[in-house]
Amino acid sequence: MHKICVIEGDGIGKEVVPAAVSILKATGVDFEFINADAGDEVFEKTGVALPEETVKSAKECDAVFFGAAGETAADVIVKLRKILNTYANVRPVKAYKGINCLNSDIDYIIVRENTEGLYKGIEAEIADGVYTATRVITEEACEKIFKFACNMAEDRKKQGINNGEITCGHKANVLKLTDGVFKNKFYEVAKQYSVKPEDYYVDALNMYLITRPETFNVVVTSNLFGDILSDGAAGTVGGLGMAPSANIGDEYGLFEPVHGSAPDIAGKGIANPTATILTAILMLRYLNENDAADRVEKALEEVLENKLTTPDLGGSLTTTQMAEEVAKRV
């Protein structure tokens, strides 16, 4: 049995998470879902956005399934990533039939280092009107993220998905020390694997992910760059409503759709659950429930292709109705 800590969070998280959980239940996999609170509403009631009992539950479960955070996102999901030491942010970018995509052959994964860079949050006012942010890059974190990404490239090669290509995005031409280390460590680690390494300056890589996205397999980069690249990449396959993510560490897995709480449509029953369903598929694979993951993905593909979707994807169904269409095909 798999124990899952379920945190719906704010806004549409309260709609898309139950929708995805209903599909997980339909797989027949033995789950125990443990609900926990976090986010804006909890903060308004208690003054704490991420209660200690929620953190305790997250640590005691096999995985965390998270919906969305509103204004308290930095105190909830960002903090939870740090507490669980989920150093790898995995962002699949894949085209599905029935969705308006830039290219029908898009199928790659962005692996973003999740603990360092500018997102360390080390900022200061060093003089009147002068502010700094410190960018932290360590060899240890570089080695961990590159090993993770290379293992992923090797796994995809074994599955017949591309030939082990792995691409590093950096700005070593400008950030000569920090990104110099990042680039050099990439090639040092890649030599230990049966992969095909290449690197690009991240601004050029951003362009190539739009002009020839079908040529990429695994893309690995630092925290800020990965955040920007992955949101842009989502735009090539239908937007953030099609963008799942997984935060993986040595001990914990934290799974969340990329989109936010979308307060403008919250409560209307029209939120697109696709990103959350795709996130559930990532969680199933993390738990080694690959048969169930394959069944859910196949069911979702049928639903998307037949436009049995929410209005933003060209359909006329509610969030719950779309999830029901997927669940009955599982």
Image (spheres, rainbow, N blue to C red):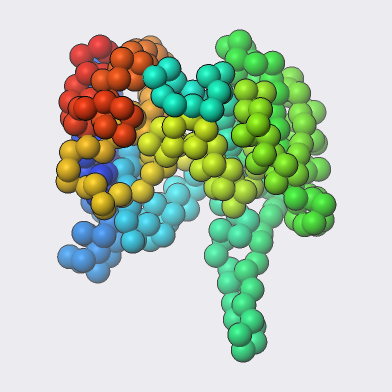
Q: Point out residue 66 in the picture as x, y percentages from the top left corner.
A: 33, 42
Determine the residue positioned at 82% across, 52% down.
Answer: 173
Q: Evaluate whether residue 188 shows in this view.
A: yes
Is 196 placed left or right of 91 in the picture?
Answer: right
Residue 208: x and y in percent read: 68, 34
Number of marks in the rendered image: 0
Inspect this view and state whether residue 89 appears. Answer: no
Q: Quadrant of the N terminus?
A: top left
- On the image, which quarter does residue 246 sit in? top left
86 or 273, which is in the foreground?
273
In the displayed structure image, the side of residue 5 where residue 175 appears, left or right? right
Q: Nearer the viewer, residue 306 or 120?
A: 306
In which quarter of the view is residue 243 placed?
Answer: top left
In this picture, is 158 found above or below 58? above
In the rendered structure, the answer to whether residue 135 lies left or right of residue 278 reads right
Residue 270 lies, in percent from the top left, at: 22, 37
Q: Quadrant of the C terminus?
A: top left
- The residue at the point 62 percent across, 77 percent down is 131
> Is 198 displayed left or right of 35 in the figure?
right
Q: Residue at x 43, y 17 (%)?
A: 97
Residue in the image at 20% along x and 14% along y: 328
